[in-house]
Image (cartoon, rainbow, N blue to C red):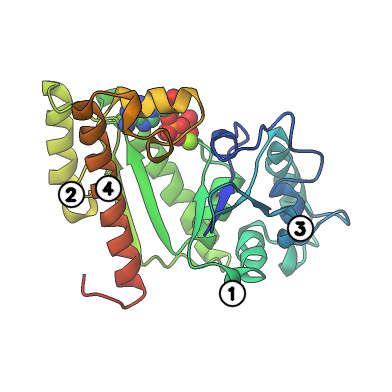
Amino acid sequence: MLALDLDPQASLSAMFGYQPELDIGENETLYAALRYDSQRRALREVIRPSYISGLDVVPANLELHEFEHDTPRLLAQADRRKEALFFTRLSEALATVQADYDVVVIDCPPQLGFLTLAALCAATGVLITVHPQMLDIASMCQFLLMTSDLLSVVREAGGTLDYDFLRYLVTRYEPQDGPQTQVVGFLRSLFGDRVLTNPMVKSTAISDAGLTKQTLYEVGPQNFSRETYNRASEALDAVNGEVAQLMAAAWGRTSR
Ligand SMILES: Nc1ncnc2c1ncn2[C@@H]1O[C@H](COP(=O)(O)OP(=O)(O)OP(=O)(O)O)[C@@H](O)[C@H]1O
Ligand SMILES: [Mg+2]
C-alpha cells in the first residue's frame, strides 16, 4: 500500500515517521513528481518506506504549496502543452508505480486547490469525511458546490472523473450529543447509502494516541480502560471493514 500526503501540514507524514521540517528536504515531496520544470523527478524517487511493513509513503511539507502557485501561472500561458495539464500529472505519476501496490491512499489538504483537484482526477474512489456539526456541514456544502463547478470545467477540458465509489464518512461523532445525531440523520436522509453505515466515534483513545504520533493500533489497549479502547477499536474496525468492502467490490471480488 502507498500513502500519498498532499497536505502541506503533513500530519500523515508525521504519523508515519517523517517530520516535515526535519526529515524532508527540498524536492523530496510529491511536488517533485508534479512540478512543471526540469527538476521534475520520478515518483518512485520520492517514495519512502514506513516502519509498517507493506506501507510506503510519499511525505509532504510546505513545498507542496508551490504546485498551487505554478499551476495558475502555467494555465495562463496560451501555448500550454497537453502533457502539462495539471489534472493528469498525478495519475501519470501513479501509473509508473501502480504495479507495486494494491491500494494507494491520497490524503488531501482541507481546501479546494489544484492539489485536491489533481487527487480527485487521479482517484478511483472518494471518501469525504464529515464532522457532524452544522457549521462543518455548511462549509462542506460550500466545498462540494465549488468542487462540482470546478470539476465540470476539468471534465470539459478532458479530465476523467470516474469513481468506483464516493462515500461520506462521519467522523469524531459523539452519539450522546443530540444535535450531532440530528445532523447525522439529516445527512443520511440527504445522501442515503452514500453515507457509510458505521461512523467513527470521537474517542480520547484516538486523540491520546495522536499525541505520540501513533494510531490506535500502535498504542495498543494497555494505555486505556478496556471499555475506552474497545469502543474506539470496534468503531475503527467497522469503518475500515466497510471501506475494504467497497474496494473489494470495485475489484469485482464481492457483490456490493
Ligand atoms: N475519532 C477521533 N476521536 C478523537 N479525536 C480525533 C478523532 N479523529 C481525529 N481526532 C483528532 O483530531 C485532530 C485532527 O484529526 P485529523 O488530522 O484526522 O483531521 P482532518 O480532518 O484530517 O483535519 P484537516 O481537515 O485539518 O486535514 C487530531 O488531533 C486527531 O487526534
Ligand atoms: Mg487531514
Q: Nearer the viewer, mark 4 or mark 3?
A: 4
Disc 4 from disc 3: Cα separation: 33 Å
Q: Is the residue marked 4 within 8 Å of ligand 1, measured from its CB?
A: no
Q: Is residue 73 left or right of residue 132?
A: right
Front position in the image: 215 or 47: 215
Which residue type carries mark 3? Glu
Read off the residue under disc 4.
Answer: 237
Q: Nearer the viewer, mark 2 or mark 4?
A: 4
Q: Residue furthest right?
A: 38
Q: Compared to 233, does 42 lie above or below? A: below
Which residue type carries mark 1? Ala
Q: Residue at x 58, y 54 (%)?
A: 118
Which residue type carries mark 2? Thr
Please state, as top left, top right, bottom left or bottom right, where the C terminus lies in the image. Answer: bottom left
Front position in the image: 225 or 144: 225
N-term mark: 1 or 2: 1
Front position in the image: 140 or 101: 101
Q: Nearer the viewer, mark 1 or mark 4?
A: 4
Read off the residue under disc 3.
Answer: 45
Q: Where in the figure is residue 207, as x and y percent of width and height? A: 38, 24
Residue at disc 3, secondary structure: helix
Read off the residue under disc 1.
Answer: 99
Front position in the image: 174 or 14: 14
Q: Residue at x 18, y 28 (%)?
A: 227
Read off the residue under disc 2.
Answer: 197
Residue at disc 4, secondary structure: helix
Residue at disc 1, secondary structure: helix
Q: Where in the figure is residue 165, as x and y percent of width and height? A: 33, 62
Q: Where in the figure is residue 210, as x and y percent of width and height? A: 45, 27
Which residue type carries mark 4? Asp
Disc 1 from disc 2: Cα separation: 32 Å
